[in-house]
Amino acid sequence: MKTSHPPPTAQNDTLDFAPLAGARQLFLTSTSKAVTPFGGLASFIAWLRQIGFPDRAARELPFSYASPNAIPIVHTFTAFLLSVVVGASRFAHCDWLRFDSALHAMLGFKRFPGDDTILRFFARFTQGHVEAFFRPLFRWLLALLKPPAEGFTLDLDSTIFAREGSQEGAAKGYNPQRPGRKSHHPLLAVLAEAPFVLHAWLRSGNTASGRGVCAFLKEAFAQMPEGWRLRCLRADSGFFDQTLLAMLEEHAVPYIIVARMTTALKGRLHSAALVWRDLGKGYAVSSFTLRLHGWSDTRRFVVVREREREDKSAVGRRLIDVPGYTFRVWVTNRTEDPATLWRDYNGRATTLATHRGVEERHARRRLLHAQVFCHRSGDALRHFRV
């Protein structure tokens, strides 16, 4: 006796969808049949359409194709952008999207460019083209952001892009993912509330975190629209440097930066003169002023002390002279109480190192690749694998 299985019922989540290009109206719905692995791009495509990305990108592109049979140039650029968002790390990966008719319908593209077309598109870019296209496009995107009333928080960070083979600028350096392999070490300035990469430098893998940070920040500040202000700048111990602190104070930028544990700081942490305020649950906070060797001035430090427990891993540095506790120290020019500053720094969650969840971390890394490319397209073209 044969039994027949009832057909799967469609979920009641059909919605109208306007493609990125063209006037054809679509209806999106979910189904048990495997139609496309890129259905999640629908929200990203809808956002590009809402902000008028195709028209703006077409207006800023510094060259065009004369052939009437050529794929529209803005379609080629959009195809590359979507490829990076879904995880492409070399031009050949752009063909992942080339034969997905459902995705093409959402985009409204009659023809989807192959990897050779995208490669030839970027091969036409000179440094002048880079400045003429990406700078105006970036300023337009930045103007779409609505700054908070108190100003944006700017998070400084660096991350590691592991590389294979011999790519320009890749060098052996600190690489926890693939020790001993070549990498790039980008420097990032992220507007935390957006989140949005305000500025990025693509650097060799053997570059220290804070190298060139003052020049980098001057470029980042210059890109901020007139009238914008920064509520605070936050950074880890890789940026604990007298030159940077002096620059931030000169520009009147409030900052919280993780302090590097020098001998003088360690000595001050177990000083009997330090007054601690208990916060409960094994935490206590304090603050003090100190002028380190080579510094031009005395600065304020805030410290969080955490009691080590068997049921919880303590965060921070252990000191031989103070067993049973770990310490975290920040240097700051802000005047709030230490507990407030500690909680503020803990909100530094827009960088790759502090994102929770593997899938979320991978998604943000892919978006970061796209944004770094847009900031430094000349360099990124050389490191994007062919």
Image: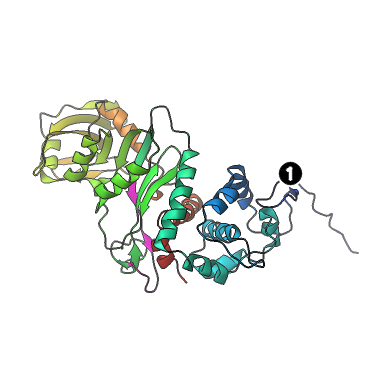
**Quadrant (top left/top right/bottom left/bottom right) for the N terminus:** bottom right
From the viewer's side, name the closer residue of 204 and 59: 59
From the viewer's side, name the closer residue of 289 and 239: 239
Magenta span of residues: 156-170
Q: Is residue 346 above or below residue 212?
A: above
What residue is drawn where x is 24% and y is 38%? 248
The quarter of the picture where residue 269 lies is top left
The quarter of the picture where residue 105 lies is bottom right
Residue sitting farthest toward the bottom: 165
Left or right, 239 with reference to 190: left
Q: Is residue 273 visible?
A: yes
Residue sitting farthest toward the right: 1
Residue sitting farthest toward the left: 293
What residue is drawn where x is 59% and y is 45%? 52
From the viewer's side, name the closer residue of 155 and 141: 141
Task: Tell me where residue 336 appears, x and y as whole percent.
Answer: 27, 25
Q: How many marks?
A: 1
Task: Tell me where residue 298 appears, x and y as whole percent.
Answer: 12, 34
Q: Is residue 344 above or below residue 64?
A: above
Left or right, 84 with reference to 265: right
Task: Tell me where residue 214 appears, x and y as whole percent.
Answer: 25, 47
Mark 1 residue type:
Asp
What is the chief secondary structure element of the magenta stretch? loop
> Residue beneath label 1, please?
16
Left or right, 324 with reference to 355: left
Q: Is residue 90 above or below residue 137?
A: below
